[in-house]
Amino acid sequence: MTSIRVALAQTNSTVGDLDGNAATVLRVASAAAAEGADLIAFGEMVLTGYPIEDLAVRGSFQRAAAARLSALAGDLVSAGAGDAVVVVGALGTAADGRPTNTAVVLHQGRIVTRYTKHHLPNYGVFDEFRIFASGNEPVVVDVAGSRVGLAICEDIWQDGGTVEQLTDDSLDLLLVINGSPYERGKAPLRVRLGAQRAREVGAPVAYVNLIGGQDDLVFDGGSFVVDVDGELLASGPTFVEHLLVLDVDAPGQTVVRDAAFARRADDTEQMYDAVVLGLRDYAAKNGFRSVILGLSGGIDSALVAAIAADAVGAENVVGVSMPSVYSSAHSRTDAEDSAQRIGLDYRVQEIASMVDAFQGALGLSGTAEENLQARMRGVILMALSNAEGHLVLATGNKSELAVGYSTIYGDAVGGYAPLKDVSKTRVWELARFRNARALDAGGVEPIPENSITKPPSAELRPGQRDDQSLPDYELLDNVLDAYVENALGRDDLLASGFAPEVVETVVSLVDRAEWKRRQYPIGPKVTAMAFGRDRRLPITNAFRESGAD
């Protein structure tokens, strides 16, 4: 083989923004061509955004996507990238008229060939098997005298298909374009898988991934190259656009022109960056310039306020303290402290008179009275959102959502929930991380220490604490991890050593709260089993784990 220069372009697309996505491709391809790239690779369905879900079957969208792809081939020539082989993810059409998930090869102003994704995932967040037709033919492209095989994301996660077909094809490089969503701990799995496939096809593997938020998914980038023997040769950063350029001379001889290895953040830092990017893109791509949230003085709202400031800028965050007669003095002062540390727009709206008005008419007590307070707060936030155009952020975490420890139409109101897939124990972890990051940068810790250390409480009745209604959060999260993440039943939970009374309580609460979860705002998926696309159970469901009510 001759030497080829490869450019892996991890970019941020917006679903449906064909012109904007094409402009990004042109901008980055021009930069890569200026560095002498022979092969420029973009992520899965970069031209349409990903995932496009049922947009794929809409005729008007199919026609618009096809027209934009055709124009892109010529535009690349005008942008100075006509001599490079450019691979873009796009929407295609099968012989039977069904849409396809396709890698399109562009060169010298024309479409040279297309590769159709073989393995269509039908698990977790993916519904591709329902939408797309699958391919069955391998594609090898000549790039400056080198043989480059193509694959798309799931094709390397499953045995067989194009990887198996290419094992005897004397490849010089296997290029994999991806739209692989972030999950905590997933990045090392990708590299190990890339190494395995490199050894199988007898060629280096170049893996390019999207970045950016799309509804409840966050794509983290982290593009990389592994050698034929599985050695990691180069890696890109996570959660930012990046162009990784390298020379491939022969298997085992790859020269990286860019920084060889991006700094690999630990799991906590990556999770924090994921929720920030998820919120930033959800707001920007849906036309919101500002966000609003209730500031209670507790850890969840303090963390969400810090995330929001990092995502959209502190000047675009409104925090509203809404004390009731049961709100403690420290809750009020901690909320104000949080706002001052971050520099957001801080407001105070007492709710006592509103609650009294409803109480005078309804005479509620117990849980109904407690929920009324939360709903008054939800009304205030939604009213300000309507009046001023803010995106309302729900501040609840995954542990609370799991057991239904939230008030529907109260603290559960909002358009986006940054902590929806973050357990309570990890809320504390992220708060500590964010404060440490601030100190390392010579700044002020955004989250008050008292918000982190004080016992959690909804403060809807005198002396209320979360541990009066729920197991200790560390124990609760361990049970939830087993029951929700790993789908263990009651007997398995007991065999794992959890106390029967804890198992009965948690299982019963989780099963009864499905209707609440279904109505909760979307939020960024950061674990392998997020509520929503990942875990879908019927609301009307008479099955109960043996022993549970």
Image (tube, rainbow, N blue to C red):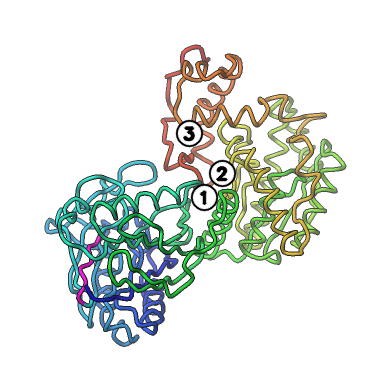
Residue identified by numbered label 2:
420
Instruction: Say if mark 2 contacts mark 1, CB within 8 Å.
Output: yes
Identified at 29% across, 63% down, the residue is 175
Q: Position of residue 438 (x, y in %)?
A: 72, 59
What is the CA distance from the residue labelled 2 to the residue labelled 1? 7 Å
Identified at 65% across, 60% down, the residue is 387
| CA neighbours of label 2 inside 10 A, class few (<14), some (14 to 19), many (20+) | many
Q: Position of residue 535 (x, y in %)?
A: 43, 36
Q: Is 507 rendered above or below residue 188?
A: above
What is the CA distance from the residue labelled 2 to the residue labelled 3? 14 Å
Q: Which one is nearer the viewer's eye here, 411 or 359?
A: 411
Magenta range: 145-150
Does 467 sit left or right of 402 as displayed?
right
- Residue at the top extreme, as displayed: 547
Residue identified by numbered label 1:
524
Residue identified by numbered label 3:
485
What is the CA distance from the residue labelled 1 to the residue labelled 3? 16 Å
Which quadrant holds residue 19? bottom left
Q: Position of residue 268 (x, y in %)?
A: 59, 49
Disc 2 residue type?
Lys
Q: Earlier in the sequence, mark 2 or mark 3?
A: 2
